[in-house]
Amino acid sequence: MGRNMRFSGIDIIGDIPWGTHLCSFYQTKQDLLNMIIPYFKAGLESNEFCVWVVSDPLNEQIAMEVAQNTIPNFDYYLANGQMEIVPYTKWYYRNGELYLNNLISEWTKITEKAISRGYGGLRGAGNCAWVEQKDWESFMEYETAVNDMIEQLQLPVILLCCFDLLRCKGSDVIDVVNSHQFALVNRNSEWEM
């Protein structure tokens, strides 16, 4: 696979290689959108298959409306099946139960399917505001497993995990940073790496 560089859409980091698993901490809904919209715009324009897993403060409808109003040709990408917006209850939680063990293999299958459909790879993002303290340890184990999967399989994948900084304890921030390759934080309306 090499270190094929991709435009991230995020000014502070610029180009990133396939196999990047990063996280960001936001404080407001607008902070989250200011990161996620350019990220997906860059992926769509680079012929990548995109999956956006949403939770509070966004739902499918709001995410769809914002994307339609801010990403040129978004309806075209959506109609062609290049973009999926999925609520966390159909991704991380299924039938009322935490569903993490099989997600690693699902990321692999989705990436393989994207490549077979002619896309350059997979660009995914999930808002992790849904994670409650009772699920925290399991979710951090999942995040570490995602890193391992990307490294071992050398998949053409870029994954961004977004966390609400106001909901995180200090130890949570350390856990998140330790389970990702690098972190971005929005402080005083400025992004820092």
Image (tube, rainbow, N blue to C red):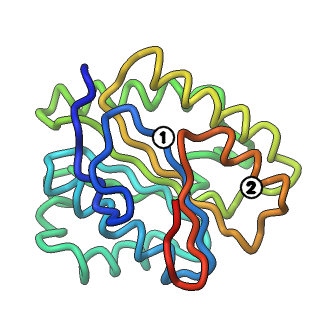
For disc 1, the marked residue is: 21
Q: Is the residue 77 above or below the residue 67 in the image?
A: above
Q: Is the residue 134 above or below the residue 76 in the image?
A: above
Under mark 2, the amino acid is: Val
Under mark 1, the amino acid is: His
Category of crowding for the residue at label 2, using alpha-carbon neighbours closer than 10 angstroms: few (below 14), some (14–19), many (at least 20):
some
Category of crowding for the residue at label 1, using alpha-carbon neighbours closer than 10 angstroms: few (below 14), some (14–19), many (at least 20):
many
Q: Is the residue 80 above or below the residue 187 in the image?
A: above
- 115 lies left or right of 14: left
Using the image, tell me which numbered label, if any, was put on residue 11: none
Instruction: Identify the secondary structure beneath mark 2.
Output: helix
Which residue is pictured at 20% across the width and 29% down the height? 115
First of labels 1, 2 by sequence position: 1
* Residue 186 position within the rendered picture, expressed as x and y whole percent measured from the top left: 56, 73
For disc 2, the marked residue is: 173
Looking at the rendered structure, the number of numbered marks drawn on it comes to 2
In the picture, the quarter occupied by the N terminus is top left
